[in-house]
């Protein structure tokens, strides 16, 4: 019985333990799930603005939206990497401004009401952007009804791209308006006193001419200056803020360029030899070249003097006939065949006029084509081309001149327009379509005609084959597998006589000289440990940029902040030497000038010459022929004529100055000067206020982790 009770008691304890463990597991599981979420959030954090986390998905969504706006504005289907860099930067700066200034605007009660927005979009104070979009091209007047119709159809009657673009514009207009309100508040709090205006007039009016002696720091040899370690450290401690550095990485790397092999040259030569007969026999040279050549057919006419020497000789001395073939020959790392495509008497230039009908949609294209046909018929029957151009042409630049474009040569107009204008006989009218719309073109005069030639080039570039790439990759792979740290890397570079290159990188750098789109290498440099071989995000130690395989190692890592003394010792030494040289030169000038006021006499003692400067005032930034020397300008602006002050230590030299004359200006418009200063301050107020707000918050930018 006692045993049974004992089992019961133990069972109670066991159940309690099991329940307790289950609760612990439940809580721990919840914590782990929560931790996973938090960990994921930290992983996706692209930055922090005033303590608020910016998540990568949110940022990328806005980047994509702005990217679509860029595409609409530029008419491009795709953006290149440089364009995306600009889009991402603009998105980031916009988000920074929104986060920083949003609280400021809220605190001040600044906003844009719906009534204000309505007024700017379709009321009495239309925003310039809206005016530009909805200006009638025929009248040059703003069309308010077009805005109203567009907004009525915003939900169902316009394309998604147009709707997105419009909503983006609305947001920009609102942002600009509230920013303008804030800047106006700042400006209203600024005031220029009469004393400030008087002082500014005095400084601006006072024009100074002076003579000077300059002894350059370079005139003192380094050996004449002794610098101790204690002096260097004392200077560094006093000026350490001058040695602030960004986060940086210094890498060393070797490239394994992929260059065509002997086999690649042989294959290209074999290809050109085998296709020669087909090229000779084809009746459609343009189609054949565009289908087979590495370089498309160029629809360009050349005089004999403009052709390559070997082609010109073949035509003139060998009497090449149309459709005869020259080659194969080797040029610019390619094997080529040249076929004489056409010979004609062609003018170098023509004079023409046109009527342009712009087209923005398929429906407009049908109407515009019908109008073009009608206008062509009217002109051919004796209609006034100039009058019709002034009435119908969308090219406002030429329309006012009756459509006259004057004389132009080959390559100055878009291709369809050029072909029509040069193919026309004098007085002939042709309709041509281009990216600008539909043109009604009349050639009014043709220049002197000369015999010109069109050449069809069949080109086979010698490029590395897949096998060549694989062979080069194998060499790079062998190198990196055998040299897994900095010491082995250096030894192998020396033993194999490879060229080691060096690059110092900032976290957001996107370029390394000689490498195509090397951003992955930059990111790898900031993720590596010092002395390790760099690895890409997929763990590979071999990077491929264009026709180069790259293997690199991290040599040095610098964190943001004050650079350690050892890292900037050379720069500190240069600064200390400059100071000491300045002291030596100042003492040398003092000795030579003792008891003298004649600069020419002092210059003779110093073995140098006297130079002059004029039209300098307190607001000057530099001295003509010398450069930026604020200490010298401040000195001459504050001394009386014919006084020789103490030597002035400048940026590049030590100076002894003497004012020869002072011309007082006649500008006494105190009110005008106050307005000018107020306007100048007003221009800077918005920027400086935002800059102050920006410096007051912590901004952490981690974009380099993702892009």
Image: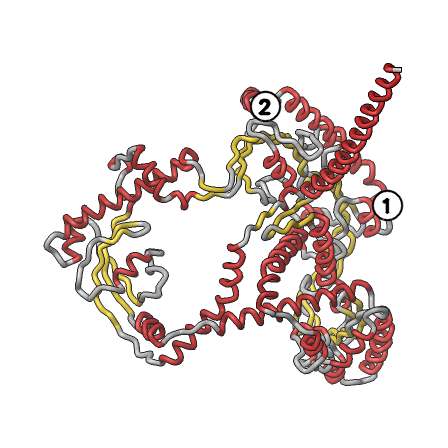
Residue ranking furthest to the left: 595
Secondary-structure class at tag 2: loop
Q: Nearer the viewer, mark 1 or mark 2?
A: 2
Q: Quadrant of residue 442?
A: bottom right
Quarter of the rendering containing residue 219: top left
Q: Residue at x 35, y 60 (%)?
A: 622
> Within 10 Å of the Cα at label 1, are there few (<14), some (14-19), or many (20+) other Cα atoms?
few
Is the residue 161 above or below the residue 279 in the image?
A: below
The residue at which mark 2 appears reads as 485
The secondary structure type at the circle numbered 1 is helix
Q: Position of residue 578 (x, y in %)?
A: 30, 43
Residue 524 coordinates in the image, percent (x, y): 63, 35
The answer to which of marks 1 and 2 sits earlier in the sequence is: 1
Q: Is residue 526 above or below residue 362?
A: above
Work out whether 65 lies above or below 396: above
> Foreground: 322 or 556?
556
Q: Which mark is residue 281?
A: 1
Q: Residue at x 57, y 63 (%)?
A: 104
For this rendering, which residue is in front, 165 or 602?
Answer: 165
Q: Position of residue 555 (x, y in %)?
A: 53, 30
Is 700 situated above or below 129?
A: above
Label annotation for residue 691: none
Q: How is the image coloured?
A: secondary structure
Q: Nearer the viewer, residue 417 or 88?
A: 88
Quadrant housing the C terminus: top right
């Amino acid at each position: 019985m006692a045993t049974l009770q004992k089992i019961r008691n133990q069972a109670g304890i066991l159940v309690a333990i099991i329940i307790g463990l289950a609760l612990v597991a439940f809580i721990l599981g919840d914590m782990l799930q929560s931790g996973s979420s938090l960990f994921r959030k930290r992983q996706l954090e692209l930055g922090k603005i005033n303590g608020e986390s910016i998540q990568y998905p949110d940022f990328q969504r806005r980047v994509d939206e702005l990217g679509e706006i860029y595409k609409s504005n530029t008419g491009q289907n795709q953006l290149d990497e440089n364009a995306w860099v600009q889009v991402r930067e603009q998105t980031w700066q916009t988000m920074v401004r929104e986060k920083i200034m949003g609280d400021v605007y809220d605190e001040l009660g600044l906003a844009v009401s719906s009534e204000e927005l309505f007024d700017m979009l379709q009321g009495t104070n239309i925003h310039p952007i809206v005016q530009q979009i909805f200006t009638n091209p025929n009248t040059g007047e703003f069309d308010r009804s077009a805005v109203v119709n567009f907004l009525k159809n915003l939900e169902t009657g316009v394309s998604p791209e147009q709707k997105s673009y419009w909503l983006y514009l609305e947001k920009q207009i609102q942002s600009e308006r509230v920013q303008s309100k804030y800047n106006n508040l700042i400006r209203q709090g600024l005031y220029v006193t009469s004393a400030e205006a008087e002082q500014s007039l005095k400084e601006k009016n006072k024009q100074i001419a002076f003579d000077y002696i300059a002894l350059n720091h370079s005139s003192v040899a380094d050996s004449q200056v002794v610098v101790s370690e204690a002096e260097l450290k004392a200077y560094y401690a006093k000026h350490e803020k001058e040695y602030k550095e960004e986060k940086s990485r210094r890498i060393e790397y070797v490239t394994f360029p992929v260059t065509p092999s002997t086999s690649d040259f042989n294959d290209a030569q074999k290809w050109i030899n085998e296709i020669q007969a087909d090229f000779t026999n084809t009746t459609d040279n343009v189609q054949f070249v565009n289908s087979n050549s590495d370089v498309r057919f160029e629809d360009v006419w050349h005089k004999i003097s403009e052709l390559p020497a070997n082609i010109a000789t073949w035509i003139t001395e060998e009497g090449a006939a149309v459709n005869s073939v020259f080659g194969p020959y080797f040029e610019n790392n390619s094997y080529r065949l040249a076929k004489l495509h056409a010979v004609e008497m062609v003018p170098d230039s023509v004079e023409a006029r046109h009527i342009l009908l712009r087209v923005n949609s398929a429906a407009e294209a049908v109407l515009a084509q019908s109008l073009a046909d009608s206008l062509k018929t009217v002109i051919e029957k004796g209609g006034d081309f100039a009058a019709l151009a002034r009435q119908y042409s969308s090219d406002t630049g030429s329309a006012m001149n009756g459509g006259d474009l004057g004389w132009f040569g080959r390559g100055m107009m878009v291709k369809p327009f050029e072909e029509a204008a040069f193919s026309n006989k004098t007085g002939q009218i042709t309709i041509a379509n281009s990216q600008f719309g539909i043109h009604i073109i009349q050639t009014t005069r043709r220049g002197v005609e000369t015999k010109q030639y069109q050449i069809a080039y069949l080109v086979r570039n010698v490029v590395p084959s897949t096998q060549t790439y694989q062979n080069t990759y194998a060499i790079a792979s062998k190198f990196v597998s055998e040299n897994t740290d900095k010491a082995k890397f250096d030894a192998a570079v020396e033993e194999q006589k490879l060229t080691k290159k060096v690059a110092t990188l900032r976290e957001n750098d996107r370029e390394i000289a000689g490498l195509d789109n090397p951003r992955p290498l930059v990111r790898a440099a900031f993720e590596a440990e010092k002395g390790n071989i760099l690895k890409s995000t997929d763990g590979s130690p071999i990077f491929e940029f264009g026709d180069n395989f790259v293997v690199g190692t991290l040599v040095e890592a610098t964190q943001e902040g004050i650079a350690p003394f050892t890292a900037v010792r050379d720069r500190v030494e240069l600064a200390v030497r400059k100071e000491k040289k300045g002291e030596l030169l100042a003492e040398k000038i003092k000795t030579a000038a003792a008891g003298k006021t004649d600069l020419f006499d002092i210059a003779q003692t110093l073995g140098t010459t006297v130079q002059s400067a004029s039209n300098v005032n307190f607001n000057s930034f530099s001295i003509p022929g010398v450069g930026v020397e604020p200490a010298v300008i401040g000195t001459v602006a504050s001394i009386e004529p014919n006084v020789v002050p103490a030597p002035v230590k400048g940026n590049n030299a030590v100076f002894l100055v003497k004012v020869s004359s002072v011309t007082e200006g006649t500008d006494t418009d105190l009110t005008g000067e106050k307005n000018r200063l107020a306007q100048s301050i007003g221009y800077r107020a918005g920027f400086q206020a935002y800059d102050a707000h920006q410096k007051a918050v912590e901004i952490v930018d981690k974009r380099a982790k993702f892009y």
